[in-house]
Image: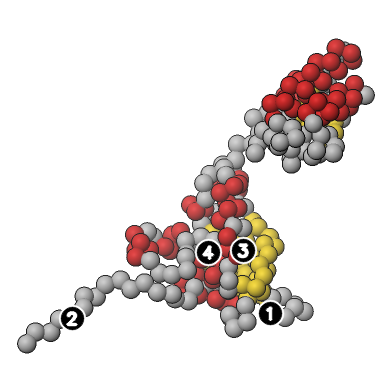
Amino acid sequence: QTETKASVGFKAGVKEYKLTYYTPEYETKDTDILAAFRVTPQPGVPPEEAGAAVAAESSTGTWTTVWTDGLTSLDRYKGRCYHIDAVPGEDNQYICYVAYPLDLFEEGSVTNMFTSIVGNVFGFKALRALRLEDLRIPPAYVKTFQGPPHGIQVERDKLNKYGRPLLGCTIKPKLGLSAKNYGRAVYECLRGGLDFTKDDENVNSQPFMRWRDRFLFCAEAIYKAQAETGEIKGHYLNATA
């Protein structure tokens, strides 16, 4: 008679986040990104588990244990909930402090950083409410941002205007104008004395005003205002979306 024994392998399953991501003994580093979250756990969820869940879901964790966890250095890359304070005067609210290692984030990318820190963790079921209260970004990460390609001096050189503040405005209403009427508003503002006008951040290339049409009518408005005033004028088009 032979006995067959099941091989000992990896078993997936749900385990408490605080076993891995709640580390009150952790000493923060100068290069860590530090976040302070106001956390309201669901009934029955201890604050340590809630804080650890935030650290996990906004860094290396997921809802279950996976075998690929063994293929990376979890201690190097994981976020850590290292301190928890109860909010005075509030029932079941806590400030959970989370430290993120710098290597978790792409250099010079605000989008990547906030996708992790304020991303899908805000829909996490273990939490009744979550709010980012404060964020410390270390100089080591700030220095990876190159900043805008042109500063105020280049803007003054382009407009040929010095020794005074530049005066501009945003075109309103920000949504609903046709490209032709938008260009008309740009012209009236520039002709009336403004140095520049700009798109509202909500304006991109909607059905009522396509980007190319807005560009053409704004260019016409600028050239006309320049010819009539003898000054260099400008318009800032939203091309970021």
Locate residue 99 relative to residue 150 in the image: left or right: left
Graded by Cα atoms within 10 Å as few (under 14), some (14 to 19) or many (20 or more), the crowding at tag 4 reads many
Q: Quadrant of residue 35?
A: bottom right
Residue indicated by mark 2: 5
Residue indicated by mark 3: 122
Q: CA distance from mark 2 to mark 4?
A: 36 Å
Which mark sits nearer the N-terminus, 1 or 4?
Answer: 4
For mark 4, give the secondary structure.
helix
Residue 13 shows in this picture: yes
Q: Give the mark toward the camera: 2 or 4.
A: 2
Q: Give the mark toward the camera: 1 or 3.
A: 3
Q: Quadrant of the C terminus?
A: top right
Q: CA distance from mark 2 to mark 1?
A: 48 Å
Question: Which x, y percent locates residue 61?
Answer: 47, 64
For mark 3, give the secondary structure.
helix
Residue drawn at point x = 77 percent, y = 38 percent: 200
Is the C-beta separation of discs 1 and 3 under 8 Å?
Answer: no
Amino acid type assigned to the residue bearing label 4 in the image? Glu
Which mark sits nearer the N-terminus, 2 or 1?
Answer: 2
Question: Which x, y percent locates residue 24?
Answer: 54, 73
The answer to whether residue 6 is above or below residue 182 is below
Amino acid type assigned to the residue bearing label 3 in the image? Phe
Residue indicated by mark 1: 92
Q: Residue furthest right?
A: 192
Which mark sits nearer the N-terminus, 3 or 4?
Answer: 4
Residue indicated by mark 4: 57
Q: Quadrant of the N terminus?
A: bottom left
Amino acid type assigned to the residue bearing label 2 in the image? Lys
